[in-house]
Image: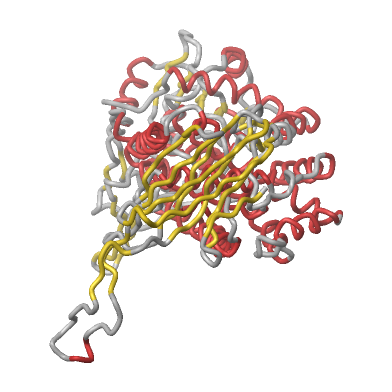
């Protein structure tokens, strides 16, 4: 009978996690609480964001000054640092959580909903972060917005219109875009609540907040980082200047450097391919799930303990002839067998734990000791007097089974489980320990000497030879079950381990990268132009009645325009731009970048409407361009000609 077991990657993860458990203990190991830590960081991020929003100006002409004013006060500076660094920690923790569930094989089959919503949540996190950086309106914001606009300009529906908002002459376009971005920033944050609800809805008791030591220590470390290394802005942005470089936050802007190395089509292919791969990943790797449990409906007493204990809400209680009965939903069942350990009347069984076969083998071989382990825990040593069985989960070991085994003359029972917070099926070892410590039904009967039972938390990579041999040779006394857990909290070392990634956030968010050649000068054409109609009609009939006919001319199509740029009389570029819209009757947005050798230049821009060659607009100017300096050329509709900005 197939039973989910440990894979090579899983053993590698256990080596790392077991090392951390030695300093954190298995209860506080951060690798076992990554999802809860991410949710806690999201809460911190949202609360600090609300504080910043109260003092933020949405007007792009004053937004930078409002952010700097916030940073000018001690509390504001700390809150801004908390907002930035908790956001970075959120992405790092989310990625680590995804890697963790892949390595531990917790993303397929009955867990696919959690995986898909997790990928969607990651995308939302990234969108929120990018929009947040743009709203600061420093050079990083402007360049981030410009590069994002270039990315979306590959899609015909956007074109060059978005880029003109970040670099042009009319700031009202940017003001409107800022309002959209702020709304998206808030709306997406609210949307995350829904995606996270779907993410955990199949878990009976999802962990939403990490243990106290972890959330207090993480909070203090982020506050300390905000005090020592305050979050700072890049220089202020100017809508008429092109920034050549910016500080890159590698947690949110990690894909942006690719925009300067590979074509936009390749960037889209990489982006869509990567996230499509993530979304369909659970179905790319074939796997088999444990067979579902079976409930004897007629013999069920309706005690509800299996319903309470099931980690995936696969059991529901239904009325039958005036009595409650447990009913299994096989689609949700993970085949863990935890419900088998929950049943006081022993009316639940699972094929991967054939109880009668186990009992018969014990009667035949008559071992002095019997060991039970889950497939992800340590393997007991081979001893003549020790007989070992593997269960789908240690939580499937019902206390009644151990009572029966001890009544056969067996001197002691060893139960080996995963580390406390690392149960493959989430809660198996937790319920196991509570039952044998007589805190949860079905409890180990008091007439049974608890000293004859050893529960050992140990991952697959750990040797338990010493503990098992000591138990075999020890005197079995007392009513308390012997429980050996992993590790003990070392406050100093544990805090240092958490501080290491957190204090890397500052250098990883202030690293400057040039996105344009810093040895050159830039000439940028960015403007909106409304060309003349190719043809028009005096009226467009909308019906037979006179009042339903258009009284003014209706433009059917506008002329494309041809833009030429000359440097010292030499043609540098010639390109035709078409009107937007399905009927090609909307304004034309032009955005072009040219990088020239610095020095004295005679530049000439020429615009000609292709449908009306006689309609020409020109600008010729003598200028001196310096390194990393930009010249913006726009079109002023009120003046009817080109204008140059520095």
Is residue 77 found left or right of 136 in the rendered image? Answer: right
* Relative to 592, residue 164 above or below: below
Q: Position of residue 155 (x, y in %)?
A: 37, 47
29 up-or-down from 333: above or below: above
User: In the image, what residue occupies the spot 33% across and 20% down?
Assistant: 361
Q: Residue at x 56, y 61 (%)?
A: 186
Left or right? Give the position of 296 relative to 282.
left
Q: Quadrant of residue 511?
A: top right
Q: Quadrant of residue 420?
A: top right
On screen, residue 636 versus residue 307, left or right, reads: right
388 or 238, which is in the foreground?
238
Residue 343 in view, yes or no: no
* Residue found at the far left of this picture: 544
Q: 365 or 324: nearer the eye?
A: 324
Quadrant placement of the N terminus: top left
Q: Nearer the viewer, residue 240 or 42?
A: 240
Question: Can you give x and y, in whole percent of width and height, for residue 298 in the image?
Answer: 23, 54
| Left or right placement of residue 135 versus residue 127 in this view | right
Residue at image location 73% in from the left, 49% down from the top = 236
As rendered, which of 511 and 19 lies closer to the eye? 511
Does 68 appear above or below 365?
below
Q: Is residue 20 visible?
A: yes
- State the residue at coordinates (81%, 30%): 492
Q: Position of residue 178 (x, y in %)?
A: 58, 60
Percent across and percent down for residue 17 are 59, 26
């Amino acid at each position: 009978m197939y039973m989910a077991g440990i894979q090579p990657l899983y053993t590698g993860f256990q080596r790392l996690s077991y090392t951390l458990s030695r300093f954190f203990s298995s209860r506080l190991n951060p690798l076992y609480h990554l999802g809860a830590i991410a949710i806690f960081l999201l809460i911190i991020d949202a609360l600090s964001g609300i504080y910043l929003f109260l003092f933020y100006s949405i007007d792009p002409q004053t937004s930078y000054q409002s952010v700097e004013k916030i940073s000018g006060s001690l509390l504001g500076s700390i809150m801004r640092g908390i907002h930035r660094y908790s956001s970075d920690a959120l992405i790092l923790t989310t990625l680590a959580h995804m890697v963790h569930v892949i390595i531990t094989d917790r993303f397929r089959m009955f867990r696919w909903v959690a995986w898909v919503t997790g990928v969607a949540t990651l995308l939302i996190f990234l969108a929120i972060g990018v929009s947040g950086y743009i709203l600061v309106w420093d050079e990083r914001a402007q360049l981030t917005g410009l590069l994002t606009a270039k990315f979306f300009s590959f899609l015909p529906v956007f074109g060059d219109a978005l880029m003109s908002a970040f670099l042009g002459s009319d700031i009202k376009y940017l003001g409107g875009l800022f309002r959209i971005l702020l709304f998206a920033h808030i709306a997406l944050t609210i949307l995350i609540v829904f995606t996270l609800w779907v993410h955990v809805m199949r878990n009976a008791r999802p962990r939403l907040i990490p243990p106290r030591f972890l959330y207090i220590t993480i909070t203090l470390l982020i506050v300390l980082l905000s005090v020592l290394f305050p979050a700072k802005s890049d220089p202020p942005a100017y809508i008429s200047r092109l920034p050549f470089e910016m500080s890159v936050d590698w947690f949110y802007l990690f894909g942006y450097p690719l925009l300067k190395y590979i074509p936009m089509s390749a960037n889209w292919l990489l982006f869509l391919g990567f996230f499509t791969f993530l979304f369909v990943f659970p179905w790319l790797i074939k796997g088999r799930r444990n067979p579902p449990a079976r409930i004897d409906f007629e013999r069920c007493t309706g005690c509800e303990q299996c319903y309470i204990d099931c980690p995936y809400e696969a059991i529901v209680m239904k009325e039958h002839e005036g009595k409650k009965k447990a009913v299994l939903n096989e689609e949700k069942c993970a085949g863990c067998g935890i419900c088998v350990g929950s049943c006081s009347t022993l009316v639940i069984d699972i094929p991967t734990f054939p109880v009668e076969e186990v009992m018969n083998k014990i009667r035949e071989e008559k071992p002095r000791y019997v060991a039970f382990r889950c497939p992800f825990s340590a393997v007991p040593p081979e001893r003549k007097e020790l007989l070992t069985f593997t269960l789908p989960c240690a939580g499937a070991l019902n206390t009644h089974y151990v009572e029966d085994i001890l009544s056969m003359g067996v001197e002691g029972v060893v139960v080996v489980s995963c580390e406390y917070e690392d149960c493959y099926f989430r809660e198996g070892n937790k319920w196991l320990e509570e039952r044998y410590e007589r805190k949860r039904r079905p409890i180990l009967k008091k007439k049974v000497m608890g000293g004859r039972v050893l529960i050992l938390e140990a991952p697959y990579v750990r040797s338990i030879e010493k503990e098992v041999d000591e138990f075999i040779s020890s005197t079995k006394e007392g009513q308390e079950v012997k429980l050996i857990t992993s590790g003990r909290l070392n406050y100093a070392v544990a805090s240092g381990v958490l501080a290491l990634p957190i204090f890397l956030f500052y250098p990883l968010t202030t690293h400057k990268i040039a996105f344009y050649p810093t040895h050159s000068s830039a000439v940028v054409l960015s403007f909106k132009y409304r060309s003349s109609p190719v043809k028009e009609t005096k009226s467009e009939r909308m019906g037979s009645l006179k009042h339903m006919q258009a009284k003014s001319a209706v433009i059917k199509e506008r002329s494309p325009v041809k833009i030429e740029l000359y440097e010292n009389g030499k043609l540098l570029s010639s390109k035709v731009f078409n009107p937007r819209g399905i009927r090609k009757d909307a304004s034309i947005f032009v955005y072009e970048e040219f990088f020239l050798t610095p020095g004295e230049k005679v530049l000439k821009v020429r615009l000609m409407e292709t449908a009306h060659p006689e309609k020409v607009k020109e600008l010729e100017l003598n200028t001196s361009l310096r390194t990393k300096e930009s010249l913006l050329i726009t079109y002023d509709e009120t003046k009817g000609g080109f204008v140059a900005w520095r």
